[in-house]
Image (spheres, rainbow, N blue to C red):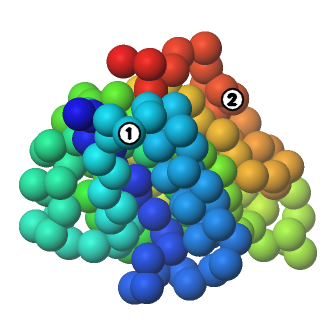
């Protein structure tokens, strides 16, 4: 049996955004279809304490971020244990990353305000992810602007292992 972890923005402690919930649910259903019945899926909240999720992550054969919230200080608030997940070197992917940028600002400042730590973690995630998709033009533009290279789907498949 394969163990997958979905890191979600949705759980009751999270965004409670119906779109995030639908993406998370659809991702879980897709994993089940791709793997048949031979799968165990755990859903963890993106901003939980590392102590609460580290055992689940340790047992994971693959990790997928549903609705990755790209935020200026995501390494502190939204994903305080992202660096620990990246250090596991487990297969991982990102489905439907999104950001909230102030579009009333001028073009150069729309993309400003992100900490170096968050950008560096995003670049590392981009390098390691087997797939990395976004949910809109603004997020695509942001990823390009900060120098991500692989945020389009890659040819590798996490669920064929």
At x 49%, y 52%, the residue is: 28
User: Could you tell me residue 87's position as x and y percent?
Assistant: 21, 37
At x 54%, y 81%, the residue is: 15
Q: Is residue 65 above or below residue 75?
A: above
Q: Residues within 10 Å of mark 1 (few under 14, many from 20)?
A: few
Q: Is residue 120 above or below residue 81?
A: above
Q: Nearer the viewer, mark 1 or mark 2?
A: 1
Q: Quadrant of the C terminus?
A: top left
User: Could you tell me residue 103's position as x and y percent?
Assistant: 86, 69
- Asked if residue 125 lies left or right of residue 72, the reply is left
Q: Which mark is residue 37?
A: 1
User: Could you tell me residue 124's position as x and y percent?
Assistant: 41, 34
**Nearest to the observer: residue 78 or residue 2:** 2
Return the disc, 1 or 2, that comes first in the chain's sequence. Answer: 1
- Asked if residue 15 lies left or right of residue 49, the reply is right
Q: Is residue 143 above or below residue 65?
A: above
- Asked if residue 128 lies left or right of residue 33, the reply is left
Q: Residues within 10 Å of mark 2 (few under 14, many from 20)?
A: some
Residue at the disc numbered 2: 152
At x 31%, y 57%, the residue is: 42
Q: Quadrant of the N terminus?
A: top left
- Asked if residue 151 lies left or right of residue 126, the reply is right
Q: Report, in whole angstroms, how far the alpha carbon at label 1 lies from the one at label 2.
A: 29 Å
């Amino acid at each position: 049996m394969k163990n997958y972890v979905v890191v979600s923005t949705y759980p009751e402690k999270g965004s409670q955004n119906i779109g995030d919930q639908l993406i998370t649910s659809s991702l879980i259903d897709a994993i089940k279809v791709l793997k048949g019945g031979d799968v165990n899926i755990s859903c963890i909240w993106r901003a939980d304490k590392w102590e609460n999720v580290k055992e689940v992550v340790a047992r994971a054969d693959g990790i997928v971020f549903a609705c990755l919230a790209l935020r200026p200080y995501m390494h502190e608030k939204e994903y305080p244990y992202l660096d620990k997940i990246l250090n596991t070197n487990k297969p991982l992917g990102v489905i439907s990353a999104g950001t909230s940028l102030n579009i009333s600002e001028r073009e150069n400042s729309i993309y400003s305000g992100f900490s170096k730590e968050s950008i560096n973690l995003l670049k590392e995630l981009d390098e390691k992810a087997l797939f990395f998709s976004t949910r809109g033009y603004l997020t695509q533009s942001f990823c390009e602007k900060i120098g991500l290279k692989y945020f389009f789907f890659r040819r590798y498949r996490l669920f064929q292992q």
